[in-house]
Image (cartoon, helix red, strand yellow):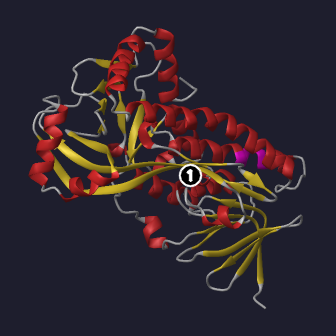
Amino acid sequence: MPKKNSHDVIIIGAGPAGLSFARALADTGLKICLIEKQTIATLANPPLDGRDIALTHDSISLMKQTGMFDHLPKNEISPIREARVFSGGSSYFLGFDTKQMNKNALGFFVPNNEIRRASYRAVKPFKNVTIKDNITVKKTTTDDARGTVHLSNGEILTASLIVAADSRFSGARAQMGIPVTTKDFGRVAIVCRMAHTKPHDQITYECFFDSWTMAVLPLQGDKSSLVLTLPAEEAEAVMAMAPAAFNNRIMQNLGDRLGKMKLIGERHSYPLVAVYASHFTSKRFALMGDAAVGMHPVTAHGYNLGLAGAHVLANEIRKALSLGLDIGDATVLDAYSRTHRRASAFLYYGTNALVNVYTDNRPVALALRAIGLRIANHLPPFKRYVTKQLTGKAA
């Protein structure tokens, strides 16, 4: 019989959400164990994966509280001064900026691999946090007394609380029998970086064409991150395009806004599947990050939601500790679930509805969304609300 190794909290998945949660609890002295299928070497130096994350002001504040922000290279933090939304090739746009805000940026783009590296570095100094790397979870169970995790090496771990932060395709979630609502958009996101001869002036462009979208995200210097959302059947051909042909396609659709453009490095592709768990907790078990809510990237809120959720649960656990309560008690988990569902439900379903509207290529839909941009541009309350959502509630 394998020996059982006891902890206070076991976190399945050492991605940004799992590491953020571990760091938010690290100074409590709780015995925390992260389980990760990647190696420590990869966690310490994550490769560039093409994705750039739009951090809200709230997320920046949370990262500063835990010291994660200090580990982000300053030359990789790119402010967003303005966002412009276009329908098709029209020059008319719906604009959002900082003019009515007491801030100098809507948000900040940071490469995903830098966030992952910063998260690991913030956790690394804490001796009460251990990481079991290069290993997978075979089975997850819980009862009234504890949660139990069976690892691929035969080891068995127990804890007062199990937290699954192992992606939108969470194995632990399935093992615990928690169903999800899944939305397969039938599309693929292709992400890459491009250099250009004209300055971007820290402006983000979101362009909706008949059946695909293109987001252009300003980075440091004269370069931008591109996110193309294409029907799955078209994505393979775009991935296989010669660099010169790819450059021409982007310039033809973006016009002369950024001048001559050139692909930098590799293109990466990701299938677009959104998920929303039917419930975020069960007995001594909680879902976090994409395992709870896997967002479509169009609103760029996936990481921000995961980070906020990590701190909500960490704060509920801190309250329990201060009162001498069991950290895995249902009252602790229920409080987290209620708060995170309030924060995520409208954003998740609203985003999916927005995507449906802007990927409908019927003539009437194309006409209505062009009209919609003009109406929205003359509704200050709507624009203030959207700006608040872009920046975070601290706006």
Quarter of the image where one finds residue 307: top right
Q: Residue at x 80, y 45 (%)?
A: 334
Asked if residue 316 lies left or right of residue 345, the reply is right
Quarter of the image where one finds residue 31: bottom right
Q: Residue at x 27, y 40 (%)?
A: 220
Give the prevailing secondary structure in the magenta stretch. helix
Check disc 1 and report its element: helix, strand or loop. helix
**Quarter in which the N terminus is drawn:** bottom right
Asked if residue 148 lies left or right of residue 106, the reply is right
Asked if residue 195 lies left or right of residue 298, the reply is left
Q: Residue 101, image x and y in percent?
A: 46, 16
Seen from the viewer's position, the closer of residues 149 and 319 is 149
State whether residue 31 is above or below residue 248. Answer: below
State whether residue 193 is above or below residue 222. Answer: below
Mark 1 Cα-neighbour bin, 10 Å: few <14, some 14–19, many ≥20: many
Seen from the viewer's position, the closer of residues 222 and 123 is 222
Q: Is residue 91 magenta?
A: no
Question: Which stretch appears magenta?
Answer: 313-318
Seen from the viewer's position, the closer of residues 189 and 64 is 189
Q: Residue 167, image x and y in percent?
A: 55, 58
Disc 1 marks which amino acid?
A: Asp
Q: Residue 251, image x and y in percent?
A: 14, 37
Query: Residue beneath label 1, please?
Result: 290
